[in-house]
């Protein structure tokens, strides 16, 4: 894990946070019980740049929270006038705030918010995904992976956040909770899946990049 002085240095040497994202970051920190779930300046910039590299047209995000990563991904869609981010959030209390920030970012045409359980919403989305970002409940990571992989185009990408889970993935197996076990199950399965190649980035809480062969 990157220690905070290095984190501060890295952020100070990263393109400044876009004003609407800085405002959402601040509001999330002022109003949410677990603001650390938000992707933040570094990861948001990285997500935007991944979009500029991969040039996706259809993106699925599982786990919206306050909308920071969905907006970051959509801001990377400059190459694709008809590009869309579908994002799924289970908590209806987030809906109003997410929609407000999507509107203020001028991204109402690009970001489609679905409120409900991802496991029920994903099968109803009949898209071929260029990029999927998994960032919701950890015990379902593998279920989400198995559901979306057949609908990811060849050469498309899946990214999964928190795959090092605060270092708990290499902790004492006897003390592991269901979230940790879910992440380990996901990491092991993907790593052994011949349909993909993958890299685990020890960045923030661990970011897995998966490419469908
Ligand atoms: C880590 S946060 C997402 C952070 C966001 N992607 C970002 O980077 O700013 C995880 C979110 O997933 C949502 N979530 C948890 N279980 C879910 C489920 N079964 N279906 C959809 N969303 C879920 C939570 O309510 C929470 O807002």
Image (cartoon, rainbow, N blue to C red):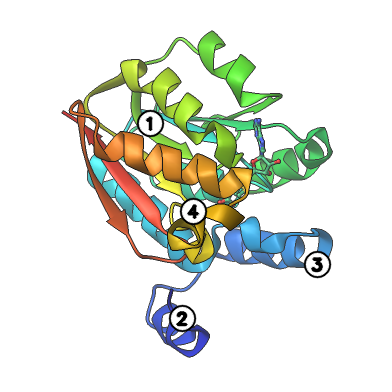
Disc 1 is placed on an element classified as loop
Going from N to C along the chain, the mark reached first, 3 or 1, is 3
**In the image, is the residue at mark 4 within 8 Å of ligand 1 by its beta carbon?**
yes
Count of marks, rendered view = 4
Residue shown at 45% from the left, 78% from the top: 11
Closer-to-camera residue (20/166): 166
**In the image, is the residue at mark 1 within 8 Å of ligand 1 by its beta carbon?**
no
Residue shown at 37% from the left, 58% from the top: 46
Q: Position of residue 163 (x, y in %)?
A: 44, 52
Q: Which residue is mark 4?
A: 162
Location of residue 9 with respect to 183 vertically, above or below? below
Location of residue 164 with respect to 73 vertically, above or below? below
Disc 4 is placed on an element classified as loop
Q: Position of residue 48 (x, y in %)?
A: 39, 52
- Do the residues bearing badges 2 and 1 touch, measured as CB atoms within 8 Å? no
Disc 2 is placed on an element classified as helix
Image quarter (top left, top right, bottom left or bottom right) of the N terminus? bottom left
Specify few, some or many for label 2: CA neighbours under 10 Å numbering under 14, 14-19, or 20 or more: some
Query: What is the distance, in whole Å, between disc 3 and disc 1 at their CAs?
Result: 34 Å
View extreme (front): residue: 174
Image quarter (top left, top right, bottom left or bottom right) of the C terminus? top left
Q: Which residue is mark 3?
A: 30
Specify few, some or many for label 3: CA neighbours under 10 Å numbering under 14, 14-19, or 20 or more: few
Going from N to C along the chain, the mark reached first, 1 or 4, is 1
Closer-to-camera residue (165/112): 165
Observer-side mark, 2 or 1, equals 2
């Amino acid at each position: 894990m990157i220690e905070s002085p290095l984190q501060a240095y890295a952020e100070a040497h990263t393109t400044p946070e876009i004003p609407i994202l800085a405002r959402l970051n601040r509001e999330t920190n002022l109003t949410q019980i677990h603001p650390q779930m938000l992707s933040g300046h570094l990861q948001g910039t990285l997500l935007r740049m991944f979009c500029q590299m991969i040039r996706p047209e259809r993106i699925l995000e599982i786990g919206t929270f306050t909308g920071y990563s969905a907006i970051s991904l959509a801001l990377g869609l400059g190459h694709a006038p008809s590009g869309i981010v579908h994002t799924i959030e289970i908590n209806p209390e987030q809906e109003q705030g997410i929609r407000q920030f999507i509107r203020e970012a001028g991204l109402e045409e690009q970001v489609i918010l679905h409120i409900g359980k991802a496991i029920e919403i994903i099968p109803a989305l009949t898209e071929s995904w260029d990029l999927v970002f998994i960032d919701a409940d950890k015990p379902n990571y593998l279920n989400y992976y198995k559901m979306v992989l057949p609908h990811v185009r060849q050469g498309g990408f899946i990214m999964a956040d928190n795959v090092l889970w605060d270092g708990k993935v290499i902790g004492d197996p006897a003390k592991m909770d269901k979230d940790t076990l879910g992440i380990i199950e996901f990491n092991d399965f993907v790593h052994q899946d011949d349909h993909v190649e993958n890299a685990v980035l020890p960045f923030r809480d661990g970011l897995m990049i998966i490419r469908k062969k």
